[in-house]
């Protein structure tokens, strides 16, 4: 895989419990796990092998995290396909690379194949200079539709408007999930997850910080916890308090405003 330069093995330690929110996605994955855990029995019973999902939504809200946690949950290796690397200079090179990448993924199966920012590769289909991407797109869809292997696709995209509609038609992916900014309850869960990861899970009242972080994504919330924990350590405090989180929140906010 490494030699091919097309695919990359991603080490995973993220668990499904590390995702705050995305409840429907987590429930769906738990159900599919039951199929993968007993695949031959399920197939004999008449159940189809799960094909894959598309996760679309805001940056920093947990799409990559979900791709990793999926592999961990299914107990499969995670292989990332960088479509940018498929595109070659010579006629037919991109298609050959795509074929090679899909064959390699099949050879690694059972595995989770994560296609990140899939819209970048297929944007512009239908425009004048898009013959190669159109062919790649067709090739991928045919493979997706005909595939009969344990390669579970997790395709992630930030911008659904840049995806060709054929992509979203039934029968391609099993399911499409929208990943939005976390609501208040989800923000609380995300803060708790990152506090727990840093051994700071004592009962901190998160009400105020949750109120003040409307519009923050999961990555911002993680950054607040990181900054607060680091500051407290440097200041020699025994543990993080609500006040420390609020102080960090003001900092994180001002950073995004400056950017
Ligand atoms: P991008 O589109 O920019 O790649 P993304 O949606 O894939 O963004 P992630 O890379 O998964 O976002 O998020 C970055 C980090 O923020 C994660 O590794 C995780 O630590 C934290 N994070 C984001 N969303 C969540 C969430 N729902 N629950 C817990 N942590 C989260």
Image: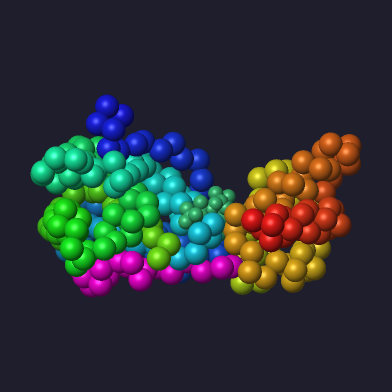
Image: 242 above or below 210? above
Residue at horizontal 51 percent and vertical 69 percent from the top: 180
Residue 97 part of the magenta-drawn span: no
Q: Quadrant of residue 94?
A: top left
Q: Is residue 83 visible?
A: yes
Q: Say whether residue 222 is left or right of residue 150.
A: right
Residue 179 part of the magenta-drawn span: yes
Image location of residue 40, percent across then percent down: 20, 51
Residue at horizontal 31 percent and vertical 29 percent from the top: 2
Could you say which is closer to the camera, residue 126 or residue 204?
Answer: 126
Could you say which is closer to the camera, residue 129 or residue 178?
Answer: 129
Please identify the quadrant where the C terminus is shown.
Answer: bottom right
Please identify the quadrant where the N terminus is shown.
Answer: top left
Q: Say whether residue 167 is left or right of residue 205.
A: left
Image location of residue 202, percent across then percent down: 79, 52
Residue at horizontal 19 percent and vertical 58 percent from the top: 129
Q: How is the image coloured?
A: rainbow
Could you say which is closer to the camera, residue 229 or residue 85?
Answer: 85
Looking at the rendering, the stretch of residues picked out in magenta corresponds to: 160-182
Image location of residue 198, percent across then percent down: 70, 43
């Amino acid at each position: 895989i490494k030699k091919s330069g097309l695919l990359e093995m991603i080490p995973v330690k993220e668990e499904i419990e590390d995702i705050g929110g995305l409840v429907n996605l987590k429930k769906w994955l738990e159900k599919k796990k039951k199929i993968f855990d007993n695949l031959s029995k399920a197939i004999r019973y008449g159940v189809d092998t799960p094909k894959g999902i598309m996760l679309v939504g805001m940056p920093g809200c947990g799409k990559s995290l979900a791709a990793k946690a999926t592999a961990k949950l299914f107990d499969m290796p995670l292989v990332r396909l960088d479509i940018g690397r498929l595109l070659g200079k010579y006629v037919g090179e991109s298609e050959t690379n795509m074929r090679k990448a899909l064959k390699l993924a099949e050879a690694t199966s059972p595995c989770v194949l994560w296609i990140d920012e899939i819209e970048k590769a297929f944007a512009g289909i239908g425009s004048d200079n898009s013959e190669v991407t159109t062919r790649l797109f067709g090739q991928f869809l045919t493979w997706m539709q005909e595939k009969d292997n344990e390669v579970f696709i997790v395709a992630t995209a930030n911008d659904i408007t840049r995806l060709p509609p054929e992509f979203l038609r039934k029968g391609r992916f099993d399911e499409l999930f929208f990943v939005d900014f976390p609501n208040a309850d989800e923000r609380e869960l995300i803060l708790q997850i990152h506090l727990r990861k840093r051994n700071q899970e004592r009962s901190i009242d998160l009400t105020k910080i949750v109120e003040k972080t409307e519009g923050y994504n999961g990555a911002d919330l993680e950054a607040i916890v990181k900054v607060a924990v680091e500051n407290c350590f440097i200041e020699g405090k025994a543990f993080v308090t609500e006040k420390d989180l609020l102080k960090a929140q003001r900092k994180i906010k001002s950073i995004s405003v400056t950017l």
